[in-house]
C-alpha cells in the first residue's frame, strides 16, 4: 500500500475510533438514564420528565455513531448465500458491487437529508427543546461515517476478523 493510501486509511481509522468512543459514551449515558428513570418512576413514584426524550436521542446517536464501525468491520446484515456458491474469482467483485450499492444508498440519503436539515432548524423537540436540525444532522453524519467505513474496508480490508468464511476481501 502506498504512503498516501496508508495515511488515508490511518485517518479513517482515527475518525472511526472517535466514533467508537462517541458511541460508547452515548451508550453509557443511555443506560445510566434508563436506570435512573426506572428508579425514579418505581422507587420514588416520580419521573424525570426529559429522560425519555433524551434516551431516544441517545439511542439514535449511538446507532448513527456506529454506522461507520459496522461498515468497516463488514458486519452489516445481508444474505450471504450467493457469495458462498460463487467461485473464488467472483467473490471479490460481488463484495465490491454490494459496497457500491451501499455507497449509492448513503449518497442518496445524505443528499435527500440536506434539505430536511435546513427545514428543521426551526422545529424543536417537545420536552428538551432541542432543534430537530441537530437530530437530522446526526443522521447525515452517521451515513458519512458509513461511507468512510466502506471506503476503508475496500482499501485495507475489514477491521476485524470476518465471520463469513465464504466471502474473502483479500483475493
Image (cartoon, rainbow, N blue to C red):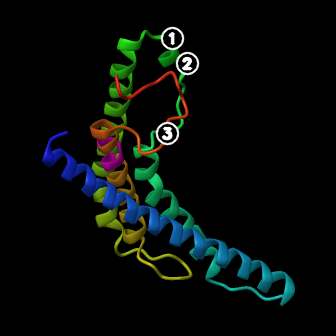
Indicate which disc residue 81 carries: 2
Picture coordinates of residue 19 (x, y %)?
41, 63
User: Going by the image, does 166 lie left or right of 136?
Assistant: right
In this rendering, which labeled residue sits more in front, label 3 or label 1? 3
Picture coordinates of residue 43 (x, y %)?
86, 86
User: Going by the image, does 63 lie left or right of 50?
Assistant: left
Disc 3 is placed on an element classified as loop
Indicate which disc residue 85 carries: 1
- Residue at x 78% of width, y 78% of height: 38
Q: Which residue is mark 3?
A: 161
Which region is colored magenta? 147-151
Q: Is residue 57 visible?
A: no
On screen, residue 46 above or below 140 = below
The answer to whether mark 1 and mark 2 are in CB contact below 8 A is: yes
The total number of labels drawn is 3
On screen, residue 135 above or below 2 = below
Disc 1 is placed on an element classified as helix
In this rendering, which labeled residue sits more in front, label 3 or label 2? 3
Neighbours of disc 3 within 10 Å: few (<14), some (14-19), many (20+): few
The quarter of the rendered structure image containing the N terminus is top left
Out of 45 and 6, give the one closest to the viewer: 6
Picture coordinates of residue 3 (x, y %)?
14, 47
- Residue at x 55% of width, y 18% of height: 81
* Separation of marks 3 and 1 at Cα, in angstroms: 21 Å
Q: Quadrant of residue 40?
A: bottom right
- Residue at x 35% of width, y 31% of height: 101
Amino acid at each position: 500500500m502506498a504512503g498516501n493510501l496508508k495515511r488515508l486509511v490511518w485517518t479513517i481509522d482515527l475518525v472511526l475510533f472517535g466514533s467508537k468512543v462517541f458511541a460508547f459514551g452515548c451508550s453509557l449515558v443511555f443506560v445510566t438514564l434508563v436506570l435512573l428513570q426506572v428508579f425514579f418512576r418505581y422507587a420514588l413514584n416520580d419521573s424525570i420528565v426529559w429522560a425519555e426524550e433524551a434516551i431516544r436521542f441517545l439511542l439514535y446517536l449511538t446507532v448513527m455513531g456506529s454506522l461507520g464501525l459496522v461498515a468497516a468491520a463488514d458486519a452489516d446484515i445481508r444474505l450471504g448465500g450467493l457469495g458462498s456458491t460463487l467461485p473464488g474469482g467472483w467473490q471479490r467483485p460481488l463484495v465490491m458491487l454490494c459496497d457500491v450499492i451501499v455507497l449509492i444508498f448513503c449518497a442518496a440519503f445524505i443528499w435527500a437529508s440536506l434539505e430536511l436539515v435546513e427545514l428543521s432548524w426551526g422545529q424543536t423537540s417537545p420536552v428538551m427543546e432541542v432543534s430537530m436540525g441537530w437530530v437530522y444532522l446526526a443522521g447525515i453524519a452517521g451515513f458519512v461515517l458509513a461511507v468512510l467505513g466502506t471506503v476503508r474496508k475496500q482499501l485495507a480490508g475489514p477491521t476485524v476478523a470476518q465471520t463469513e468464511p465464504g466471502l474473502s476481501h483479500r483475493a
